[in-house]
Image (spheres, helix red, strand yellow):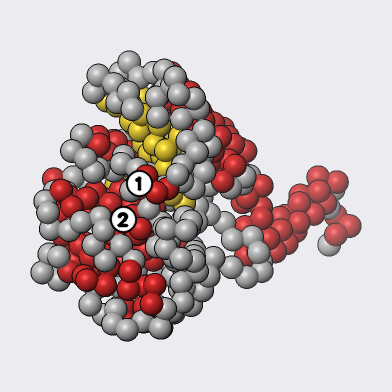
Amino acid sequence: MFRNLNKYDYLLTITLLFSVLLISYYYANPQARNHFWFKTYPIRAELSVHQISCSDNSPAWLSDILKYQTRNNNAPANQIAYIDPQGQLYHCENGYVGQYPLISDTVTEDTRFRYASVTKLWTADAILSLVRDGKLSLDTKLADVITDINNPKDARISDITIRQLLSHRAGFDRYSVFGNDMFGIGKDICPNHLQALNNITLGFTPDSKSSYSNLGYCLLGEVISRLNGDKPYTDIIAQQYDFANTNLRFVSNAAMADEVFYNYVETGITGVANIYTAFDYEGLASAAGLSGNAVELAQKAHEMVTKSSPNVLSIDKKAQCDFTKIAECYGYAMIPYQANSKLPMVYYRDGNLLGLSSLVAISDNGSIVALLSNGTSNEGVEGSNKVKMMLYNKISD
């Protein structure tokens, strides 16, 4: 039979066999398939770069930031919103909602992104509202509100204050087994087993240093709940910030219908399959549980900064910040940065989960930028800081 095949038939047969073997290999080998998908990113990035849309008269640098995010930070889909010092809103979007370019819908200003740790702005703002209303003080002890704390083995826990929780100075070390519950590592403390606070040892003496803590913000969420008749934190925030008339929603362990696809690929033998099952979203509600779009994020941030002091831009004097460094020097909600005393202060709140990043930058001159991306930089903190400096140069003029 094969004797009757000409050269073209041989070539076609070999090509078909090779294609079947290749498809079978990648079908049977998820790790190899993920590596291949990862390698195609430059192509997908260029397709996304050519899908940028902006509101009328938007500054050119908004689309420049999206191009940078797409080409350099593994984010094929992005939204950016900018409120200038005069209160004018501009926005740009790029990329595709689904995993596959061209055949997916393009990202619009209404596409949903997860806010990750930018959620902490809402928790801090709600706490500071309680302070302004006289229902709480910055020096109120956590144990006075969370009465589950009774006779802890580490006596320092009884003296933790609201001020220390806001500024990540409460003694919870995120690198310890008790410092970070978001991955389900260690003991489940907050929100369902608060009595376990009686059995832990703090990583450091409160106010002796700063250490970023999701546990601390989960506890702040419980303070909000306790001071509102034990109503669930999520219900309180939804009512207080008028979720019914916005796109804001709390996330769960499943994607929402209007939510963007996140550019996360597991390329190792073991690891996390996806962002939806990786985290305890109930425990993360007050630390990283919100979702929405960049326009509403910028608008809500604008509302927060116009409130009387203390507000989300307030800084605790005990922090002793070096404002000339973009470092983990926390105010009550944001990280302050000032290149020199002649330029405005800019405040940052950013967040990262698997395959997504979020950032809000607020300048003393009234400028606000919200940036949402469905990817994270391979450079980690350094990559994030590069974007912060780009924004600083644009909004500190």
| Residue 40 x/y as whole percent | 63, 44
Which is more toward the observer, 136 or 212?
136
Instruction: Find the residue positioned furthest to the top.
Output: 57
Which is more toward the observer, 88 or 231?
231
Query: The residue under label 2 is which amino acid type?
Result: Arg
Q: Is residue 213 visible?
A: yes
**Quadrant of res 287:** bottom left
Horizontal arrangement in the rendering, residue 222 relative to residue 33 (left or right) = left
Q: Eyeballing the image, is 386 above or below 160?
A: above
| Residue 205 x/y as whole percent | 46, 66
Q: Secondary structure at mark 2?
A: helix
| Residue 302 x/y as whole percent | 25, 34
Q: Residue at x 85, y 46 (%)?
A: 7
Which is more toward the observer, 393 or 375?
393
Circle 2 is placed at which residue position? 163
Q: Residue at x 20, y 34 (%)?
A: 306
Circle 1 is placed at which residue position? 316
Q: Eyeballing the image, is 379 above or below 288?
A: above
Q: Quadrant of the C terminus?
A: top left
Horizontal arrangement in the rendering, residue 33 relative to residue 159 (left or right) = right
Q: Eyeballing the image, is 272 above or below 375?
A: below
Q: Secondary structure at mark 1?
A: loop
| Residue 269 x/y as whole percent | 66, 69
Q: CA distance from mark 1 to mark 2?
A: 8 Å
Query: The residue under label 1 is which amino acid type?
Result: Asp
Q: Residues within 10 Å of mark 1 (few under 14, many from 20)?
A: some
Q: Is residue 98 visible?
A: no
Horizontal arrangement in the rendering, residue 374 relative to residue 162 (left or right) = right
